[in-house]
Amino acid sequence: MTFKYSRSMVLRFLIVLLLASLFAATSSFAEGRMLIKPYVETGWQRDTNFHKSEKNTKTVDTYNVKPGIKLGYTTDKSTVSLDYWFKVLRYTDQDENQVGQINADTFDYTAHNADFTAQSQVSDRLLIGLDDQFMKTRDPANADERSNAVDRYKYTMNRVSPRLTYNFAEKFGLGLKYANLYTDYSDDGPGQGEDSMQNRGTFTLFYYFTSKTAFDLDYQVWTRDYDKASVDYTSNQFMVNLKHQFNYLTLTAGAGYHDRTFDKTVPSGDIEKFIWKFSVLGQNPPDATGIPKSSMYFAVGSNLNDAGNGDSYFTSLRFDAKFTYLLMDKINWTLAGSFQNSDYETSSRNDDRYQVSLGADYLINDFFSLGLSGGLEDRDSNEAGKDFDNKYVMLNAKFNYDLGSK
């Protein structure tokens, strides 16, 4: 199918503008709190295997500057916020090109990211909201959180999501959400990414056993329509979730079923999977609004990837973890890592991919910090030519200043 990108973008913009105007109108007569926080980051990174190649490794330096601003307005019943930044990235070769390689500065570009959120408690029982995210990037992980790709194709994404939550009683309610996601590759030639449109509906019934324990039934149905050769599909996903909050930790567990059917015959055939997830999130002190003394995040789960250009789908077993510790109120240490096994449906390919990093930010004052970190990324595959390892080190400086919170 062929997407009418300009008309689609105009429609989304009008929806965002209309809802933002409604929120502004209802909020202008109420006493509220405003946020104006500009920030800027700059950094340097060295990768020993920039192209993530099995044999033809090349060291590349990356320089970046990232200015942005956070805007917000909050009243007792409504909130409107916008977080926008752009990031100028420039790449410099440190090694000679090998056969088939191109200059790193070919990938120079400016990334963009804008997150808009508006919501209002229009009655004691009804909350309505709208979220919109736009990004321009070369990172394949933004297109699919379970991505196993290593390409640097440039693309834009826009996701608009109207939502509402209705409480039938004190402990029981319903959440409804619709999301429209458009992905547009700059050069969508064969093997260089493929434009697609996703429409997703989410229906969630929730029940609070206590103030700290919640249960929900979550059903999602979505379609993904590709612009060229990849086969369109429809996914139905049902999950049962349980969430419990302790003094310092929040535990979430869920299990369910995912069914994916394709519009035409594909090598994998239609896919049915048992899916599950488990996560732990916590910090000390639990009510910290700034940088906590310590924090932890741990998540593990299994599901299908969403973006399957060329009908390339796999079952992923993914693990993520992050730990932070604030030393002497000045040095914030961070240890993070991830692991993903990708078991492909259309072949015998099976990949193990992991990443681990260690870093520290020195907090010079409330507005300025300096950071240093390093890490390793590795992929082991049973398919020839898919292995790689990359070591990297990063330096960064961050400045932010709150001009208008009151």
Image (tube, rainbow, N blue to C red):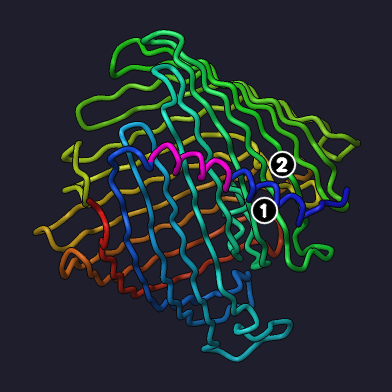
Q: Nearer the viewer, residue 184 or 132?
A: 132
- Are the residues tagged 1 and 2 within 8 Å (C-beta)? no
Q: Is residue 189 above or below residue 134?
A: below
Which residue lies under the disc numbered 2? 198
In the image, is 228 to the left or to the right of 124? right
Query: Which label was assigned to residue 382?
Result: 1
Q: Position of residue 356 (x, y in %)?
A: 40, 57
In the image, is 153 to the left or to the right of 299? right
Hey, which quadrant is residue 360 in on the image?
A: bottom left
Amino acid type, label 1: Asn
Binning the other alpha carbons within 10 Å of mark 2 as few (below 14), some (14 to 19) or many (20 upward) gives many
Q: Of helix, strand and loop, which one carries label 2? A: strand
Q: Of helix, strand and loop, which one carries label 1? A: loop
Identified at 54% across, 20% down, the residue is: 204
Amino acid type, label 2: Gln
Span highlighted in magenta in the image: 17-27
